[in-house]
Amino acid sequence: MHSLNSKGPILAFFCNWAPYRCYMDLCKSGHSFPYPIYPVKVMCTGRIDPAMVLFAFERGAEGVLIMGCKDKECRYGPGPGQAKKMAGSVHGLIHILGLEPERFSTLQYSFDEQNRLFEEMESFAKKIYKLKKSPLGV
Ligand code: FES
């Protein structure tokens, strides 16, 4: 297994509401993430386009996470459904880039799930850094 710090970053799209609040709560309480993570805040995961995810991989992300609100907690209604459709498109395309499907994941949170978010991000990072370096890495 490679060191968690020896590879490129994980890019995490956080919905501004529940997931980003959990992430910020963790940061404020002193949690540190033992891997490079680039957080990108969006107002709703329904606004993420497959091209944004593929672009992140093309620019050297080792993995991409989509962190959204739970289905019934989205402020805009259809966001999680849109995000699931987007994720289906991405999963259908990333093999074309020569990437393993486990490099991309979508997760959903409520406002009070800081610990689960931390554990699942760490689990994702460990899985990613067991893989070879992304062939698109810089
Ligand atoms: Fe968070 Fe839509 S508002 S996923």
Image (cartoon, helix red, strand yellow):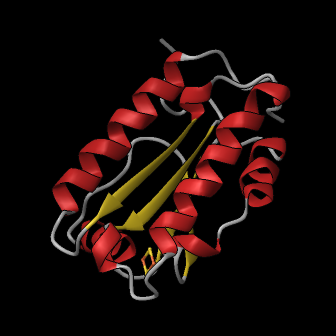
Tell which of 43 and 20 is nearer to you: 43
From the viewer's perspective, is 22 left or right of 78?
left
Q: Quick check: can you spot residue 111?
A: yes
Ligand 1 - quadrant of the structure image: bottom left
Count of picture labels: 0
Who's the residue at 80% across and 22% down the image? Answer: 98
Position of 50 relative to 2 (above/below): below
Position of 54 relative to 73 (above/below): above
Who's the residue at 29% across and 78% down the image? Answer: 73
Residue 64, given in percent of the width and then of the height, sits at 59, 46
Tell which of 50 and 15 is nearer to you: 50
In this view, the residue farthest toward the top is: 1
Tell which of 33 and 90 is nearer to you: 90
From the viewer's perspective, is 70 left or right of 3?
left
Position of 56 relative to 2 (above/below): below
Who's the residue at 28% across and 70% down the image? Answer: 22
Residue 53, given in percent of the width and then of the height, sits at 71, 53
What quarter of the picture does the C terminus occupy? top right
Q: Quadrant of residue 19?
A: bottom left
Who's the residue at 52% across and 28% down the image? Answer: 128
Residue 31, given in percent of the width and then of the height, sits at 26, 58
Tell which of 131 and 92 is nearer to you: 92
From the viewer's perspective, is 135 left or right of 113?
right
Q: Quick check: can you spot residue 6?
A: no
Residue 44, given in percent of the width and then of the height, sits at 52, 78
Position of 67 relative to 36 (above/below): below
